[in-house]
Image (spheres, grey):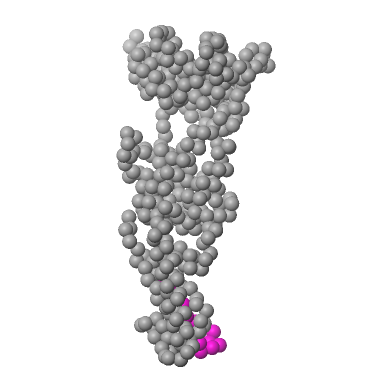
């Protein structure tokens, strides 16, 4: 991190390229951290009356004296602008100093302002969980600006490929001060992806001309999709819990295993979401909060029994929902307890139920991938194909085990 900036102002003259006059134009040359920009003072001077070393005109004539006074005023104004940027803890660049002097930076959008605009526009379009992730990314951006530039903000015009790489490197080396773990590659890529989406918004709004992400490639690591096997699912189903909170979480988890609904979509279900389908049976019809995609799921008997179990539950009745509401954090904490009590050596979270529905409950039992994709609410079948590959891997594993058993007979 640069703790101080190098700054300088020098006044120079330039003769016109086409020699129609013997008068030279005076320029202010601004230097910040090795970068230079020049601003025309729109004042003329005879080159013979110019002192290059001192950066001012020579002589005692009234016009010479007025020119030198003007030069000193410009020097003061530029220097004041530089110190203003430093005091406001903004990123100090030669373009920022020049723009501040010329007065053309007042309406320029900054990165922090872009984030605020994005949040205001997307708050009612994106799921709460998605917005929470954007807030986290924006906090990382703010701490990065403070650490790297000792500044509170940066103008969009100053974003470039190096800024993108520096931010990625910051995330890679960031060491959380609380109980959280350092970010893994995919976590870093999600932050980069959100920054990229905000930058794309700025480009769409014509706030940014050049895309700093043009040559940047997101690189996600392939992650194995964990799910419960048929035996593991049966183990949880058969396990009886005397503690009410564990019974509730077990039932909610199983409901997701048999419907494929995510946590937030399960929690907001009401009686109005159950309708008679084309086959005369009960279906769940709802919208995925994450993507606002409509999903229509024929209810399996296991799921219907779980709904019936909580029909008159006081907490469900109070909320007007099919099930008592519980936070996702508590849900996942109690699921770890359940996994331990069932001797299942997997890091079970509520989302594992969705994976289990896709693999063990549907695809492994011959449900076509197109149908599974629609029930999961995927916007593209490519997303569902990830589960198909998992199932193929499982089939391969089963066949290898079969070969071994047959070879030993």
Whether residue 399 can be seen here: no
Q: Is residue 6 left or right of residue 65?
A: left
Q: Is residue 177 left or right of residue 402?
A: left
Q: Residue at x 48, y 56 (%)?
A: 155
Please tell me whether residue 121 is drawn above or below residue 33 in the rendered image.
above
Assess whether residue 71 is covered by the magenta stretch: no
For this rendering, which residue is in front, 197 or 230? 197
Which span of residues is magenta-colored? 18-30
Please tell me whether residue 397 is drawn above or below residue 57 in the rendered image.
above
Q: Quadrant of residue 190?
A: top left
Q: Give residue 26's position: percent from left, percent from top.
A: 47, 80
Number of numbered tags placed on the structure image: 0
Whether residue 326 can be seen here: yes
Q: Give residue 156's position: percent from left, percent from top.
A: 49, 55
Q: Give residue 11's position: percent from left, percent from top.
A: 42, 78
Please tell me whether residue 71 is drawn above or below residue 147 in the rendered image.
below
Please tell me whether residue 237 is drawn above or below residue 206 in the rendered image.
above
Q: Quadrant of residue 398?
A: top left
Assess whether residue 27 is covered by the magenta stretch: yes
For this rendering, which residue is in front, 170 or 79? 79
Q: Give residue 254's position: percent from left, percent from top.
A: 48, 16
Q: Residue at x 37, y 68 (%)?
A: 7
Q: Residue at x 57, y 19 (%)?
A: 320
Q: Quadrant of the C terminus?
A: top left
Q: Quadrant of the N terminus?
A: bottom left
Q: Residue at x 37, y 20 (%)?
A: 336
Q: Quadrant of residue 268?
A: top right
For this rendering, which residue is in front, 313 or 270? 313
């Amino acid at each position: 991190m640069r703790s101080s900036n190098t700054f300088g102002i020098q006044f120079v003259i330039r003769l016109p390229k086409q020699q129609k006059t013997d008068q030279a134009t005076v320029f202010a040359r601004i230097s910040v951290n090795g970068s230079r920009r020049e601003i025309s003072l729109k004042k003329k001077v005879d080159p013979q009356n110019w002192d290059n070393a001192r950066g001012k005109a020579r002589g005692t004539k009234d016009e010479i004296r007025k020119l030198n006074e003007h030069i000193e005023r410009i020097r003061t104004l530029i220097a004041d602008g530089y110190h203003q940027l430093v005091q406001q803890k903004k990123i100090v660049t030669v373009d920022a100093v020049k723009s501040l002097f010329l007065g053309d930076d007042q309406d320029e959008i900054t990165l922090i302002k872009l984030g605020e605009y994005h949040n205001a526009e997307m708050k009612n379009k994106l799921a709460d969980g998605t917005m929470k992730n954007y807030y986290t990314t924006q906090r990382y951006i703010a701490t990065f600006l403070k650490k790297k530039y000792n500044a509170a903000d940066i103008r969009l015009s100053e974003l470039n490929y190096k800024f993108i790489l520096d931010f990625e490197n910051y995330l890679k080396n960031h060491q959380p001060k609380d109980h959280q773990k350092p970010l893994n590659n995919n976590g870093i890529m999600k932050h980069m992806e959100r920054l990229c989406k905000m930058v794309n918004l700025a480009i769409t709004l014509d706030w940014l001309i050049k895309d700093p992400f043009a040559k940047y490639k997101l690189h996600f690591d392939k992650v194995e999709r964990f799910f419960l096997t048929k035996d593991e699912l049966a183990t949880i189903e058969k396990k009886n819990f005397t503690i009410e909170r564990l019974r509730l979480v077990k039932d909610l988890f199983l409901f997701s295993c048999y419907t494929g609904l995510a946590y937030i979509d399960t929690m907001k279900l009401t009686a109005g979401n159950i309708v008679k389908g084309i086959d005369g049976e009960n279906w769940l019809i709802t919208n995925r909060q994450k993507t606002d995609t409509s999903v229509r799921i024929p209810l399996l008997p296991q799921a219907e029994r779980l709904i019936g179990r909580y029909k008159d539950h006081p907490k469900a009745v109070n909320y007007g929902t099919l099930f008592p509401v519980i936070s996702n954090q508590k849900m996942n904490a109690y699921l770890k307890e359940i996994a331990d009590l069932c001797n299942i050596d997997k890091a079970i979270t509520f989302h594992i139920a969705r994976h289990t529905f896709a693999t063990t409950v549907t695809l492994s039992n011959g449900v076509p991938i197109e149908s599974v994709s629609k029930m999961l609410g995927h916007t593209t079948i490519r997303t569902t194909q990830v589960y198909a590959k998992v199932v193929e891997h499982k089939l391969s594993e089963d066949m290898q085990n079969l070969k071994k058993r047959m070879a030993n007979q």
